[in-house]
Image: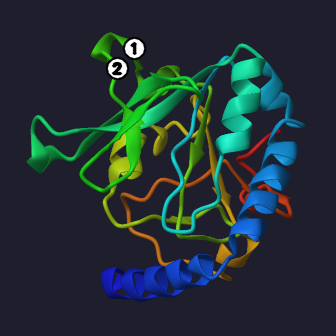
Amino acid sequence: MNSALKTQLRQRLRERRRLISPSQQHLAAQQLMLRIIKLSAYRRASHIAAYMASDGEISPEYLLRHASLQRKTCYLPRIDVTKPSRKRMGFQRYHPRQALRANRYGIGEPAGLRHCARAPKHLDIVLVPLAGFDKEGKRLGMGGGFYDRCFAFKKHRPQQKPLLIGIAHHCQEVSALPVDEWDIGLDMIITDRAVIHPRRGRGKS
């Protein structure tokens, strides 16, 4: 039941964010950056992971540039294709001027050496993409399960690093999301309009 509900909701929310104009996207990305850089957690962070936006997602591009100028080390997801059946994801070091290559989903990822990777539990902040979210910190992803598997260790140790911050356009908020036992919650959600601490009180700025 949850699978069908999630699929329908995901389609509706993806259509919603695709309607955002390029000028609105740029403004939203700037507003997102301004909210993130005010966080004490961001100021303390040394290792920050984000993603390359696609399909109408809000872009962390400006934030990555700011982090690089602040001498923070940035990372992007990289899909492990050595064993396709396992659908593993890691994080590879990234610099805003670095060339990227498209992965199997058409999303840019670093093509550097594996020794430039960092274990998920050794990151300070991860900016997580999403299709939808609610105020309880639940996240609707794209259906691949990469982030849920990658950060499964936080299921029983939610206070452990990294801080998982879902970033999205404000229009991606819903009143409630269906949840499965393997879904990993967010510590915080930041949109172009607000910083949202989940009602369960896990997130701290």
Q: Residue 169 appears at what percent x and percent y?
A: 70, 67
The residue that appears at 15% across and 45% down in the rendered structure is: 86
Colour scheme of the rendered structure: rainbow
Point out the image quarter for the C terminus. top right
Q: Secondary structure at mark 1?
A: helix
The image's mark for residue 112 is: 2
Kindly report which numbered mark, 1 or 2, lies closer to the viewer in this rendering.
2
Residue 97: x and y, percent? Answer: 57, 26
For label 2, the crowd category at 10 Å Cα-Cα, with few meaning under 14, some 14 to 19 and many 20 or more, is: some
At 52% from the left and 44% from the top, the residue drawn is 51
Establish if 74 lies above or below 54.
Answer: above
- Of 60 and 37, nearer the camera is 60
Dot 1 corresponds to which residue? 116
Horizontally, residue 88 falls left or right of residue 123, namely left
Query: Does residue 78 appear to the left or right of 70 in the view shown?
Result: left
Q: Is residue 114 visible?
A: yes
Res. 127 image quadrant? top right
Mark 1 in CB contact with mark 2 (< 8 angstroms): yes
The mark found on residue 87 in the picture is none
11 is higher (above) or lower (below) than 126: below
Mark 2 is on which residue type?
Answer: Gly
Distance from disc 1 to disc 2, alpha carbons, whole Å, reads 7 Å
Label 1 crowd (10 A; few <14 / some 14-19 / many >=20): few
Residue 26 in the image, given as x and y percentages of width and height? 75, 58
**In this picture, is 196 found above or below 97?**
below
Q: Is residue 162 left or right of residue 178?
A: right
Q: Secondary structure at mark 2?
A: loop
Residue at point 50%, 19% (across, down): 122
Identity of the residue drawn at 56% across and 68% down = 56
Which residue type carries mark 1? Answer: Cys
Please identify the quarter of the rendering in which residue 195 is found: bottom right
